[in-house]
Image (spheres, coloured by chain):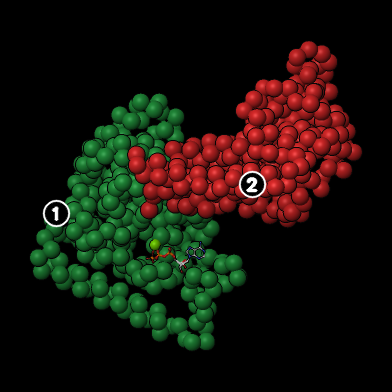
């Protein structure tokens, strides 16, 4: 118990110092457009349900952003994992795709923006599904294809790479012993490759979610966006509300850290065997 | 007359490394194995014992010659042909029980039934107390017992074992040899057992196949006619042992002479001779 309390105390030292430094600088600068007071920002964070400069509340904007990120992310997961497993297991598949994908990997997600706008414009999932009114419409129409695509690109490669790596480093004897016990290739995938590569895959999923979340601001700066934390930040900037910018940044940081933490807790619970093996 | 369960007919194998070098691993290898036989394969390192076993298991394609299992050509792995590997063959994310039940699970058996059967085989190798443990919680000897239980739980017709006790200390090894014989006598499986230990081969086998240095051929087939359990203090045991050791030494020496400095190079992890 005492140890846990110490760890907590130690980990709080730097953040507290940082806030004090901010508070001090803000006092000195005394210009809330350059650096708002700690209290201005914290009062926004304490009441996340309040309506801000007629753009909805901080919380609702975070939710919109989360849904966007998760949509792009889930599509990336659903494509990258099967593809990574195939590329990791069959060397022909690897040879077939690797060079091609290698060309796309280094392109920053943001560099896709012009092309994506040309392709999708302001089309949203509402356009795709044909729904034209109601609550569902409001949600779907905020889910622009262009944004989802940018987020997808960001998440896809980390997940693909670590899935390939995970499958490639599966001990060959494990596969052989399952084959000898009568496994067909479907069973090899589901009972051997997937669980054996799972720690690496989940690790890639964690990185992928981090990158996806980072792509958010650039995605929400795209035209047609009228909500989301990314939009909140850029819009607050244009009307010189720096305290909203900072509150938005802090929210992005906190949500990102919480998502990451959730993954890490899951990894610790599920993949004990990997840490302890050998 | 017992039936031939495995017929190996003029089998050869040459590996081609990534750099394009040819590695002859096995040459014109022929052997007939009868039902209930306990065969041990001994031979210098790299003479193709593992390769032969993997071909018998259907893990490695047979290109030259033929391997027949009860008259049918072995083309792919078959659950009637079980195999125990030297190490690291248990799934680390599964408990011991679910490792042993893997074969049945793959065959689509309901999970409850898999576990019931698995427990039975764990009892056979004396590890029922560890059914809930994970492989990393077991010692090397216990892991090999689990691997054997897993192979047996599938009720194979023939069991191929590739140096299953190779990584164990002498004491555990002797213990497991006894256990294996007990299991073999109770179940009357056919066993093909690869080992580096001449002592182990004499203790276990009905027939010992001594192989030549790579590419492997049969150098000699030795029938061990001592009654079981075999007494290591028996002079016949010692004589047989030194005879086989001499043969192996001869092989190692002659294979080294064949390697002249000019042709001696290292393509990857293997030693090629041209
Ligand atoms: N996948 C492979 N690619 C290339 N060469 C291989 C491959 N597998 C085996 N070899 C070569 O074939 C020969 C026989 O190998 P094998 O593993 O069958 O020997 P072994 O008799 O089992 O040796 P050991 O007693 O050391 O286990 C060796 O020269 C080895 O280097
Ligand atoms: Mg071997």
In the picture, the disc for residue A103 is none
Q: Do we see residue A75 in this rendering?
A: no
In the picture, the disc for residue B228 is 1
Depth check: give the residue in front, A47 or A1. Answer: A47
| Residue at image coords 79%, 26% | A53
**Marks 1 and 2, how far apart in space?**
88 Å
* Quadrant where the N terminus of chain A is found in the figure: top left
| Residue at image coords 66%, 26% | A48
Instruction: Tell which quarter ligand 2 is in.
Output: bottom left
State left or right for residue B12 relative to residue B203. Answer: right
Depth check: give the residue in front, A268 or B66. Answer: A268
- Picture coordinates of residue A10 (x, y %)? 46, 47
Q: What element carries label 1?
A: loop
Is residue A87 placed above or below A231 in the rendered structure?
below
- Picture coordinates of residue B226 (x, y %)? 14, 59
Q: Is mark 2 on a helix, strand or loop?
A: helix
Give me the chain that's red: A
Crowd around label 2: few <14 · some 14–19 · many ≥20 (10 Å): some
State left or right for residue B244 relative to residue A267. Answer: left
Q: Mark 2 points at which residue?
A: A24
Chain B: what color?
green
Give me the chain letter of mark 2: A
Crowd around label 1: few <14 · some 14–19 · many ≥20 (10 Å): few
**Residue most extreme to the top:** A134
Number of labelled discs? 2
| Residue at image coords 43%, 45% | A7
- Tag in front: 1 or 2: 2
Depth check: give the residue in front, A185 or A133. Answer: A133
Q: Does the Cβ of the disc 1 residue fall within 8 Å of ligand 1?
A: no
- Picture coordinates of residue A17 (x, y %)? 56, 48
Is residue A249 placed above or below A64 in the rendered structure?
below
- Picture coordinates of residue B1 (x, y %)? 26, 47
């Amino acid at each position: 118990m005492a140890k846990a309390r110490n760890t907590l105390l130690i980990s709080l030292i730097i953040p507290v110092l940082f806030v004090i430094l901010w508070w001090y600088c803000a006092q000195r600068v005394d210009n809330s457009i350059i650096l708002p007071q700690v209290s201005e920002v914290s009062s926004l964070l304490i009441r996340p349900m309040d309506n801000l400069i007629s753009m909805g509340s901080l919380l609702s904007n975070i939710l919109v952003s989360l849904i966007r990120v998760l949509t792009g992310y889930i599509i990336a997961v659903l494509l990258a994992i099967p593809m990574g497993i195939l590329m990791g297991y069959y060397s022909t598949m690897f040879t077939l795709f690797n060079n091609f994908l290698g060309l796309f990997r280094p392109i920053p997600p943001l560099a896709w923006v012009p092309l994506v706008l040309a392709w999708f414009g302001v089309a949203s999932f509402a356009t795709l599904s044909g729904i034209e009114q109601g609550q569902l419409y409001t949600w779907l129409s905020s889910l622009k294809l262009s944004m989802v695509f940018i987020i997808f690109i960001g998440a896809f490669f980390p997940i693909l790479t670590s899935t390939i790596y995970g499958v490639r480093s599966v001990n060959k004897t494990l596969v052989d012993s399952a084959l000898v016990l009568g496994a067909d290739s479907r069973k090899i995938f589901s009972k051997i490759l997937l669980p054996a590569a799972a720690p690496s895959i989940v690790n890639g999923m964690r990185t992928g979610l981090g990158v996806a979340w980072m792509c958010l601001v650039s995605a929400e700066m795209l035209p047609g966006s009228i909500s989301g934390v990314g939009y909140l930040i850029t819009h607050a900037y244009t009307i010189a509300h720096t305290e909203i910018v900072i509150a938005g940044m802090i929210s992005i940081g906190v949500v990102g850290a919480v998502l990451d933490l959730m993954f890490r807790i899951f990894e610790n619970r599920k993949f004990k065997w990997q840490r302890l093996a050998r | 007359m017992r039936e031939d369960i495995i017929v190996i007919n003029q089998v050869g194998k040459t590996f081609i490394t990534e750099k394009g070098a040819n590695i002859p691993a096995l040459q014109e290898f022929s052997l007939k194995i009868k039902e209930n036989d306990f065969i041990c394969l001994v031979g210098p390192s790299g003479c193709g014992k593992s390769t032969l076993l993997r071909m018998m298991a259907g893990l490695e394609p047979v290109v030259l010659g033929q391997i027949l299992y009860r008259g049918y050509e072995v083309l792919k792995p078959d659950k009637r042909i079980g195999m125990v590997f030297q190490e690291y063959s248990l799934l680390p994310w599964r408990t011991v029980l679910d490792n042993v039940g893997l074969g049945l699970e793959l065959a689509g058996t309901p999970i409850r039934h898999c576990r019931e059967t698995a427990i039975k085989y764990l009892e056979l190798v004396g590890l029922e107390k560890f059914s809930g443990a994970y492989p990393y919680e077991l010692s090397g000897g216990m892991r090999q017992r689990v691997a054997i239980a897993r192979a047996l739980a599938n009720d194979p017709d023939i069991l191929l074992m590739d140096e299953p006790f190779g990584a164990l200390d002498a004491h555990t090894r002797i213990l497991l040899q006894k256990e294996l014989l007990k299991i073999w006598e109770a179940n009357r499986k056919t066993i093909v057992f690869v080992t580096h230990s001449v002592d182990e081969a004499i203790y276990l086998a009905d027939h010992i196949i001594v192989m030549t240095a790579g590419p492997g051929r049969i150098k000699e087939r030795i029938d061990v006619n001592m009654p079981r359990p075999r007494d290591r203090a028996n002079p016949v045991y010692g004589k047989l042992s030194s005879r086989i050791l001499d043969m192996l030494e001869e092989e190692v020496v002659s294979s080294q002479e064949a390697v002249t400095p000019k042709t001696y190079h290292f393509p990857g992890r293997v030693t090629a001779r041209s």
